[in-house]
């Protein structure tokens, strides 16, 4: 099981960024996910960090900064003359400029939000399809080493056009043949299924094999007891969720599982955040070992 971590720039002092990558690699992390935006990290510095991560034998991925600057990257605002189109073209060009042509990089993007774009759900669904059709065509046309990945979200965190099983099935049926894959956020999927009183494990069953095969990347984090908050650390008390992670990882052991731990409340020192990450890695590795022995 290959475990990675989001490069959480808000909690990593600029002077510690290189050392943080070294500590991740030294403690068993195999992957790191960056968000390319000049107001998060200067892009020249990000280029150096990404190249250094590869030197440390860590694979890398990118996440759209749609969470940071929705007006420029929120898919629901896409149209043929929009700032969104311009922003994603610049993002693709930046990745191309700094990418190793021999490697492939996931680019994770959230679905169109009806609320942010002031659209009906149907309108957001159609805009979402147009955007992913457009960007996948750009990737194909230029033969780019990029895997476009839709990320599922949870309805109580933000409105989105692809959150339920039905919307995932519809999306990939409409995008059949396009170079678009799925980044499955395991806690978002788990929480959405709990809300709908649906077994999360159904995704692993044979009727949904085509959808399951679309998953090439995963996000992993914890949640609180009532599922209202996520991107927290997780622990052994979340046993039903961890059982699902075990079953999923057994079937998708070859992909990267990226930790998105953004819990900083009460952290006075950066080293506290690093310690939490290393503890989470140890727990996930224990899950992986149990998986191999159990499933």
Image: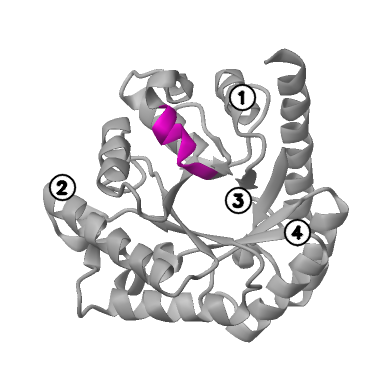
Q: Nearer the viewer, residue 74 or 269?
A: 74
Q: Can you see residue 116?
A: yes
Quick one: label 3 or label 4, which is nearer the N terminus?
A: 4
Query: Which secondary structure dominates the residues rendered in magenta?
Result: helix
**Residue 100: image x %, image y %?**
66, 73
Of residues 179 and 34, the one nearer the viewer is: 179
Per the rendered image, the range of residues in magenta is 209-216
> What's the distance in space between the residues labelled 4 and 2, CA to CA?
39 Å
* In-image side of 48 versus 121 (left or right): right
Question: What is the x, y in percent for residue 255?
Answer: 63, 43
Question: Alpha carbon of mark 3 to alpha carbon of mark 4: how far?
Answer: 28 Å
Q: Where 23 falls versus 257 (above or below)? A: below
How many badges with numbers are in the image? 4
Q: Which residue is mark 1?
A: 242
Q: Residue beneath label 4, please?
A: 58
Seen in the picture, residue 153 relative to 72 is either above or below; the reply is: above
């Amino acid at each position: 099981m290959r475990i990675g971590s989001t490069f959480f720039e808000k909690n990593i002092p600029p002077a510690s960024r290189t050392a943080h990558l070294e500590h991740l690699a030294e403690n068993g992390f195999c992957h790191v996910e960056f968000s390319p935006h000049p107001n998060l990290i200067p892009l020249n510095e990000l280029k150096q960090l990404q190249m250094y991560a590869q030197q440390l034998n860590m694979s890398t991925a990118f996440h759209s900064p749609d969470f940071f600057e929705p007006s420029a990257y929120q898919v629901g605002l896409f149209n043929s003359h929009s700032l969104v189109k311009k922003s994603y073209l610049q993002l693709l060009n930046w990745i191309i400029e700094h990418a190793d042509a021999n490697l492939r990089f996931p680019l994770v993007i959230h679905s169109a939000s009806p609320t942010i774009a002031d659209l009906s759900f149907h309108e957001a669904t159609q805009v979402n399809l147009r955007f992913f059709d457009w960007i996948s065509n750009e990737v194909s046309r230029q033969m780019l080493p990029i895997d476009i990945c839709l990320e599922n979200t949870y309805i109580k965190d933000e409105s989105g056009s692809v959150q339920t099983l039905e919307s995932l099935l519809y999306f990939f049926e409409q995008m059949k043949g396009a170079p678009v894959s799925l980044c499955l956020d395991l806690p978002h999927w788990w929480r959405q299924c709990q809300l709908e009183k649906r077994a999360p494990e159904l995704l692993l069953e044979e009727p949904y094999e085509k959808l399951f095969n679309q998953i090439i990347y995963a996000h992993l984090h914890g949640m609180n007891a009532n599922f209202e908050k996520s991107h927290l650390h997780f622990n052994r008390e979340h046993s039903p969720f961890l059982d699902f992670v075990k079953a999923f990882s057994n079937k998708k052991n070859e992909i990267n599982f990226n930790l998105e731990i953004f819990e900083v409340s009460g952290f006075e020192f950066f080293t506290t955040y690093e310690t939490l990450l290393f503890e989470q890695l140890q727990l996930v590795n224990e899950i992986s070992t149990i998986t191999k022995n159990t499933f």
